[in-house]
């Protein structure tokens, strides 16, 4: 193999590696995020995916009672408030407890 061909293949590999590293957000679950939360009573399940080497952003996936899933913008003030209200322990004895479970892959799931 000629030295020109070796240099060309090396450059091609370097370009492919740089393209793969620059498109980390393409491996995320959420391609689009919703800025609206809707009604808190319609939320059936919330899954929080932390940032990883494959996706460099926190993702919040909400499932509503009808089974539809959508992603919330974690930077939105209303989303932060919702997450804080879900994560805070309930003080009332009449309220149904919120179960927070962790599954493999560091995903937190809150069931309401």
Image (cartoon, rainbow, N blue to C red):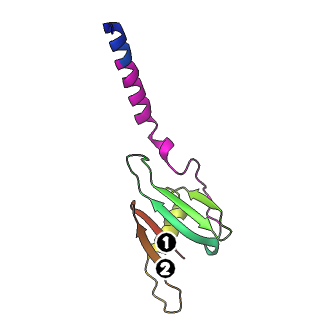
SS of the residue at dot 2? loop
Magenta span contains residue 56 = no
Q: Quadrant of the N terminus?
A: top left
Query: Compared with residue 30, is residue 65 higher up or lower down, i.e. above or below?
Result: below
Number of numbered tags placed on the structure image? 2
SS of the residue at dot 1? strand
- Residue 110: mark: 1
Which of 43 and 105 lies nearest the eye of the viewer?
105
Magenta span contains residue 14 = yes
Name the residue rendered at 54%, 51% in the picture. 30
Residue bounds of the magenta highlight: 10-38
- Residue 98: mark: 2
Name the residue rendered at 52%, 74% in the picture. 111
- Residue 27, given in percent of the width and then of the height, sits at 48, 45
- Residue 85, given in percent of the width and then of the height, sits at 49, 74
Q: Are marks 2 and 1 in contact (CB under 8 Å)?
A: yes
Q: Is residue 68 left or right of residue 89?
A: right
Q: Quadrant of the C terminus?
A: bottom right
**Residue projecting furthest to the front:** 1
Name the residue rendered at 40%, 35% in the picture. 21
Which of 4 and 18 lies nearest the eye of the viewer?
4
Kindly report the distance in space between the C-alpha atoms of the residues bearing marks 2 and 1.
Answer: 7 Å
Name the residue rendered at 54%, 55% in the picture. 73
Quadrant for residue 42, please give it. Answer: bottom right
């Amino acid at each position: 193999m000629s030295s020109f061909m070796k240099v060309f293949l090396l450059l091609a590999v370097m370009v492919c590696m740089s393209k793969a590293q620059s498109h980390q957000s393409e491996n995320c679950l959420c391609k689009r995020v919703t800025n609206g939360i809707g009604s808190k009573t319609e939320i059936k399940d919330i899954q929080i995916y932390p940032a990883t080497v494959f996706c460099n952003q926190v993702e919040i996936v909400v499932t509503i009672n009808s089974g539809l899933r959508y992603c919330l913008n974690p930077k939105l003030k209303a989303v932060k408030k919702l997450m804080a209200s879900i994560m805070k322990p309930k003080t009332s004895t009449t309220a149904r407890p919120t179960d927070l479970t962790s599954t493999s892959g560091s995903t937190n799931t809150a069931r309401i």
